[in-house]
Amino acid sequence: MNITVKYFGQIVDVTNKNQETIEIIDGQISDVLQLLNNKYELLKNKDFQIAQNQELVSLETKLTGAEIALLPPFSGG
Amino acid sequence: MNITVKYFGQIVDVTNKNQETIEIIDGQISDVLQLLNNKYELLKNKDFQIAQNQELVSLETKLTGAEIALLPPFSGG
Amino acid sequence: MKDKKIKNVFREGAISSEFIGNSIYKHQTKTSIGAHNIFLGQVRADEIDGKTVTAIDYTAYEDMANQKFHDIRESAFEKFDLTCMHIYHSLGTVKTGEICLFVFVSSPRRKVVFEALEYIVEAIKADVPVFGKEIFEDETHQWKKNT
Amino acid sequence: MKDKKIKNVFREGAISSEFIGNSIYKHQTKTSIGAHNIFLGQVRADEIDGKTVTAIDYTAYEDMANQKFHDIRESAFEKFDLTCMHIYHSLGTVKTGEICLFVFVSSPRRKVVFEALEYIVEAIKADVPVFGKEIFEDETHQWKKNT
């Protein structure tokens, strides 16, 4: 399936883009993470949470095809 | 000695004045209170604290000649 | 002995929203501030025994009250890491919906302002000789009680 | 499913003191309110390794952030007896001394607004995907960390 992945904050310093579409076979969040770690070597130094369909999810969450976002520590306000 | 006595809030509803000067021999706060209770019959129904020289004092505090104030419950803000 | 720098906290009548906005504006040059916290007391149109409050008429034992405001200020600066602190209280008539108390604290950090503001407002309610007379539509009154 | 009435909390650039004053003004017709409490986040000119912050550039995962602001609002109205509640957060560049967060709660009673405001501000800091990039005089940057 094709999944939109969005990058925010200091993650953009590593990916140099705000979003992209990745192609991945069925699986779970950890599979996306592995793919992105291979693509962006510096990503493993970064602290972030992952959202799917705008909800924070764990590495074991099944992929639904909904938008995924890599969210570094929040610093609003 | 002559002492200025000031009235505030609902105490004024009883005394019908904001302040007056009373003449009293040396003594303590309770002596002033007794004098005022005799003068204003409804005063004993009222809840108030007494300040001398802008500090709250007890009935046993000695009179200094400084200004006295009858302060009903505070309701600022 | 009374401190010489005692400010007059009282303002005649209601405190306007423009005054508050302008007070916020003046703090934008203070770039060590990270958090402001503002408390506003507004006069409620309470209904009591079928009659509605239309205004509160505030009086105070002004000298003692300003001294108490000063003591609260000193104590708050001692307890909390505040950059700025301002208090304004109305005297005279303040209509329902209008503002009668404006307390403004600023600090580098947010945790501080929450603690400080509540401390200050509670101290004002407890320690400052201000008296509110609630005026009803028919011009009768009752004396306000803080809860 | 997402609620349909989700508001957009974000404003482009700084939140002005006039906007805040005007927001206070609009609440003067609501005569059941007795207490307002306002939190303002202001951008600090922090010095870090000899360089001074001149601005914060805010970005957000906007859809998720507005959903989280909405959840915080719903939860606050459930927990506290609030009459009104407003939240505004900046996006884009906010210079030092300018305001980036404006949270405004109102209630008949003061105890409620203190508790509610702190709850809301802490929830915003913890749950809302907003990212602040601190810009230094020399145009280098670092990513802001909330403490």
Image (cartoon, coloured by chain):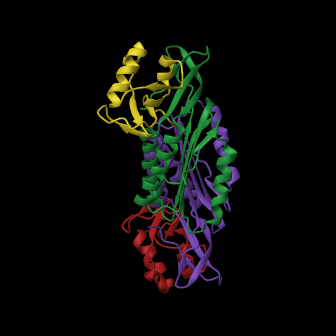
Chain colours: A red, B yellow, C green, D purple
**Where A37 falls versus C140 (above or below)?**
below
Q: Is residue B24 left or right of residue D21?
A: left
Foreground of the two, C64 or C140: C64
Tell whether C57 sits left or right of A74. right
Q: Please tell me which residue is depicted at 48% across the width and 86% down the height of the picture.
A: A41
Q: Is residue D15 visible?
A: no
Q: Nearer the viewer, residue C23 or B50?
A: B50
Quarter of the C terminus of chain C within the rendering: top left
* Residue at position x 51%, y 84% in the image: A39
Residue A34 picture location, percent across and down: 43, 78
> Where's residue C114, x and y in %?
45, 53
Q: Is residue C78 left or right of residue D141?
A: left
Asked whether A7 or D18 is in front, the reply is: D18
Residue D4 occupies which quadrant of the picture?
A: top right
Vertical position of residue C15 compared to residue A6: above or below = above
Furthest residue toward left: B60
In which quarter of the view is residue A8 placed? Answer: bottom right
Position of residue D5 measured from the top left corner of the image (x, y, whole percent): 59, 43
Query: Residue D26: where, in percent of width, then height?
Result: 67, 39
Instruction: Please say whether residue C85 is visible from this viewpoint.
Output: yes
Instruction: Report the number of discs.
Output: 0
Above or below D132: residue D17: above
User: Residue at point 55% right, 18% down?
Assistant: C141
Residue at 45% x, 63% y is C81
Q: Identify the image quadrant of residue D40.
A: bottom right
